[in-house]
Image (spheres, grey):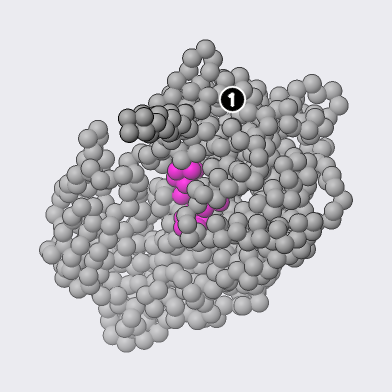
Amino acid sequence: MAHARKLFLFFVVCLIGQTVVSQTKRISADVLEDKIYASWLGQIIGNIYGIPHENVYLDNPGPETFPYGYGRNLERLKEMKGGYSDDDTDFEYMYLFQMEKHGVEPTYAQLAEAWKYHVRDYVWIANRAALGLMHSGLTPPATGFKDFNPHWFQIDPQLINEIWAVTAPGMVDYAVAKSDWGARITNEDWGVEPTMFYGALYSAAFFENDINKLINIGYQHLPANGRFRQAIDDMRAFHKQYPKDWKVAREKMRDKYYYNEPDETRTKWNAILNGACAVLAMLYGEGDFQKTLDLACAIGFDADNQTATVCGLFGVMNGTKGLPTELILPVEGWTLPFNDTYKNVTRYDLPDGYLLDMAKRTTALAGKVILKNGGSLKNNVYTIQTKSTFYPPIEFTKAPLPVMNAGERISYVLPVSGNTAKVKWEVKGVLPKCLEFKNGAFIGLTTETGNFPVEINMVTPDVTHSQKMNIRIRPANLALSAAEILTNVPEMNQAVRESMGYSAGKTSDATSIEVIRDGKLRGEHSVYYSILNNVSYPKIDYFGYRWEEQQSIGHIGYHIGLIENGGWYSSLTVQYLNENGYWTNAEEITVDPVLSHPTNIYQQPHFIEYFISFKPIKTKAVRIIGDAHALNRRGNVSPYVSITELSVYSPFY
């Protein structure tokens, strides 16, 4: 019995020892830097190689004339005398500076300021929507919420967040959580899942170079019932069924995740679709860099994003020795990969970079992440605590309050980032009667109307976070009793609308002007566009109401809809019908938020309310009116306004 007990204790000690060993990994600083350097080089290879194939192959795959080569971009490389930025690498480059400036765990607020300053163009879909919301006062993750960002499901976050995992070598849980956190600047729900997957792969690849094992690691770090987990199951099944025919597998993927995708999220930029493209390329590429790169191009859709991310992953897996010489030295006379040059051509006021220096700086940040999370550095070797976890910084999220109406139940939880379990809440100011603030939420039913400015304090053991806000309790919406809707475009030109193309699903389009007072701010058939056929600038658009009886009016709520390369007012005022029957401008007009940068699409938000106040008037008719705007990039597009709701209120202050 004593012998058996000793044997049992021996096995327990062995198991404990194995557990301790499994929770730490070691990597030399030199190997770490080489892999990080290779990740930058790999992303640049994939990005520049893939650009000629971006959004080219949708219904059918690209030709199997491999290798594709850099194509037209070889001349661009020569012109730039090295590598150059694109939206697949420039956000990570911007984040590199932010981590150096603010620490390895910057806040959402700090990143939002960087976005507003450095990102001034060269940005699309979910990224552009998030940027416009930032310029309207929102902060992440509200900038990725479905309520405000109609592109919450698109590809954007999986191509701009690799740096969080590159600086967390072997710390897979940490990398996944931080990648998820970063993805929510632009996306939410299953729109962040491919980013989490790549976060796991990049972090694990510092110690694992078997592509199938890496895919499985990423798979295990996805939500059990998530859409991208199902997509990986499908890609594996297609690969198993057609192991020698990637084109058939690609056809199956296209049918399920493109042709048969619900209309609301059916786009060529869909995050799940494009993530599936990368998984197929990796499965059929069988760990070969060049083969995987060409397949990622040929499988198509937003191909350069997959190629950049996958090639960066291969850089981490195999280091610089695994990168094909002809791809890192494509120009005769270059002696260092991409001539050791990263030419910034896309982000405002960021310097050009030297790739070796970028690798050193990124490695230094990775070292700080390792040490911050219990690791150590001794004799030029890092010991990494692999079970480290990322805890997002606690901070207030700035987002528009919901419409709060007198006489209706109010239940609204303030959006907050980070773990608020130990937070204490304080409210300063006077709330309307019967509305209380408790545990971070406004709850109650009040009949008192008006504006109630308050300050909310979120008290943590380390710091107090404060946010000022105006609780606006509205009276009845007078639009509901109007006898007539007034507009210069009572019917949208559907043919012209369709010629513009769709960056999001068609389901939000509405053909009836009646939707502007149906109380529905977003969703199916909620957005009306004042689109006509081929109308040149200027085009004055108006929306308003007429009543049978005189009304006392002091406020209008204008909810903007989805923006498609246009759709907003570049100037805006309020007019009312005076006692002599003439339209007259209202006085003392204020707009919240301020209507600024009227011709800059990169600063236009989706789905927010412009609340307009003015000197009270008495009238039978009122309208908002101004210059409609559109970029006229595609189709026979007139200037137009996108609108979901126009509400009207009697004066309350």
Q: Which residue is mark 1?
A: 32
61 sits left or right of 514 in the view: right
Q: Does the magenta-highlighted stretch encompass residue 192?
A: yes
At 56% from the left and 65% from the top, the residue drawn is: 265
The correct choice, above or below, for 398 with respect to 381 in the image is: below
Locate residue 194, reporting x and y percent.
56, 51
Where is 2 relative to 635, above or below? above
> The N terminus lies in which quarter of the figure?
top left
At 35% from the left edge and 62% from the top edge, which residue is drawn? 611
- Say whether residue 611 is visible: yes
Q: Residue at x 62, y 77 (%)?
A: 494
Label 1 residue SS: helix
As rendered, which of 507 and 30 lies closer to the eye? 30
The image position of residue 121, as x and y in percent, is 59, 45
Nearer-the-camera pick, 213 or 373: 213
Looking at the image, residue 71 sits to the left or right of residue 233; the answer is right
Q: Amino acid at mark 1?
A: Leu
x%, y% of residue 591?
36, 58
Q: Which residues are magenta?
A: 176-195
In the image, what residue occupies the spot 48% across and 43% down?
A: 176
Main SS category, magenta section = helix
Quadrant in which residue 535 is drawn: bottom right
Residue 54 vs residue 497: left or right? right
Q: Is residue 349 visible?
A: no
Quadrant of res 163: top right
Residue 577 lies in the magenta stretch: no
Q: Nearer the viewer, residue 178 or 172?
A: 172
Residue 197 drawn at (x, y percent): 55, 48
